[in-house]
Structures are given as structure tokens and as C-alpha cells.
Amino acid sequence: MSIPMEPMSVNDVYRIILDRISAGQYPRGSRLPSCRQMATDLGSNPSTVDRAVRRLAELGILRTVPRTGTYVATAGAPVAHSQGEVADEVRRVLRRAWRSGVPIDDIRAIVADAVDEIETAPRIAFVECNRRDLQHMHSLVRQQSRFEMQPVLLADAWGRKLDEEFDIVTTPVFHLNDLGDVVSDFDNVVEITFIASQTALRQLVSLRNARRLVVAAPTERGVSWMASVVGQYFSGPIERFHIGVDDPAMLDGVEVVVLNNAARLPDGWELRIPNIVPIEWELDPRFAASFEERIATLLTRRRETAR
């Protein structure tokens, strides 16, 4: 008697689609097979695939066009400029220098010095799971640090070992566990503490009399992290909603939804919730003071180990 296989979970399908995007099986801009087709291919069911697809769409990795289909996103909140954009910017700066009277030989020397500086600088990655927060948080960290960092979207890191590509990998503390598949040694990882903005915290305090409050996020860890943050300021019961996984009917009758500013509720539900509190993240000033020291210490240790 054969033992029936355990059906695929939403997380299983989510990871498979991400892997196929990373491997180029679903190229950027391409149209995905229908949920029914993918379900047949994966041995899953259309409902599970649809929930995984919706979660990826919430993260900006996929985009759904009504009556047309679902596509791998080609745009979104930009996390880095394209090579062509960078080349155009460099040319504009060089032309401006030449028009200002800087001799060609001096321009060449400036460019050479800049390249040497880049080649000897430490390679540091900043990893986040969605495009908007990647751009926002990366900007905050850069303002507090003298180190240049390369922004990396977590979905783009699947199949890679970032600590082999970079000297140091940094990430918000609530995504630390998410790096398990993309780093081989957590000694090369520096977690960064972010806190909810004061504006959002004041809103949470004012909601102490709400009868039904829900925290929502597109990942399980995100939901848990949001619940822990809200629980410090809201004494009532806190319900949890996993975007793209849980049934939206759970939101019926909810007075307040608290969610990451980068997340979105299922279509139509944002208009049905009386009060939505978006959480914007700020760099913890207590952590920012020691951030450069931690980076410098880790770089020194790596250099000594390499000798």
C-alpha cells in the first residue's frame, strides 16, 4: 500500500516559483502559466498556487494584469540603477568636468583613483525582502554609515551564497533567519535593528479601545514581528493575518489593521477596513552608534584570518 504524498504548502509553491524566476525559467517580463497549469505541473492545487502567486505579487515580484495574466515584474521601486543609467551619469559628469576646464589627463587620473578606491573598499550587502523597504532602509543605513553597501533583494539571492560574494552581509534583525539559505556562515552577517516610527507608535497608543485589531504581513515571520511590536503598545487581543495565505474573510468586521508600509491587503479590502495603520521603519539610534564599529571589527577579523 503506497503512502499518499503530503500536499504542497503555499510556502513550497512560493519557493519553487522564486527558484524558477532566479534560474531564468520565468524570465523578467514573461507571463507565468495559469494557476491551474502550474498546479498540474507541481502536483498541487490551483488554490494553493493562487495564494503563493498573490504573496509574490504583494512583494512586487509578480504583477497581475486583469483578464490578461500574471507576469514576472520588470519594474517597481528601483533598488539600483541599471548599467546603462550609470554609464550615462558617468559620461555627464566627465563632460561637465571637461567643459569646466579640467585637463583630460587630470580627468583620467580622477577616474583611475575612483576605480582604485572602489576595488579596495569592503564589499557589503544590505538584504531586504521587498523593494520598497530595501530602498528605504538601505538609504537610512547609508546615512548613518561611511560604508557603501549594495542593496540585494532577498528573492534575487536564492541559489547564491552572499557571504562568498561579499565581505559582510547586513540585514534587518527581523530577517536574520531568512538568510539561512543564502549565507553559509552567520559570522559574516551583521543584523541591524529597526524600530517603528514615532508617528505609527502614537497611532497605536490611540487605538487602545479598538475591539478587533489585526496585524498583517506577507510572511509568517513578518506577522510575528509585527505582533510583537504592536503588543508593546496595544493591550488588547491581537489577531494575525498572513497576506496571500489566510482567507481574506478573516478581515470581516475588523476595526484596525496594522501592516508594514510596504505591504498591501488583498484587492478591495483596504477600502473596507475603517482604520489602517502603516508602520514605517526607522533605524534604532542606539544601534546606529555602534554599527560602524561592528562592521570595522568584523572586517579586521576577516583580514587577520586571511593572512
Image (cartoon, helix red, strand yellow):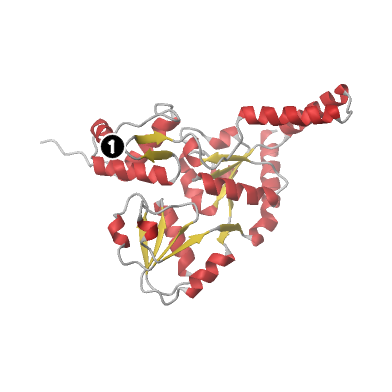
Q: Which quadrant, please, contains the C terminus?
A: top right
Local packing at callout 1 (Cα closer than 10 Å; few below 14, some 14-19, many 20+) is many
The correct choice, above or below, for 175 with respect to 306 in the image is below
Residue 140 in the image: state x and y as whole percent.
64, 51
Name the residue: 78% across, 28% down: 94
Q: Please, what secondary structure does the residue beneath circle 1 have?
A: helix
> Within the image, what quadrant is residue 44 found in?
top left
Locate residue 226 relative to residue 89 in the image: left or right: left
Q: Residue furthest front?
A: 67
Q: Residue furthest bottom?
A: 209
The residue located at (26%, 32%) in the rendering is 37
- Which residue in the rendered view is the most extreme toward the left? 1
Query: Is residue 263 left or right of 289 when viewed as pictured?
Result: left
Question: Is 17 situated left or right of 201 in this image?
Answer: left
* Quadrant assignment, res 196: bottom right
Q: Is residue 302 visible?
A: yes
Amino acid type, mark 1: Cys
Q: Nearer the viewer, residue 147 or 94?
A: 94
Identified at 31% across, 56% down, the residue is 248
- Compared to residue 234, the image places residue 178 above or below, namely above
Q: Position of residue 164 (x, y in %)?
A: 57, 33
Q: Which residue is mark 1?
A: 35
Q: Is residue 190 visible?
A: no
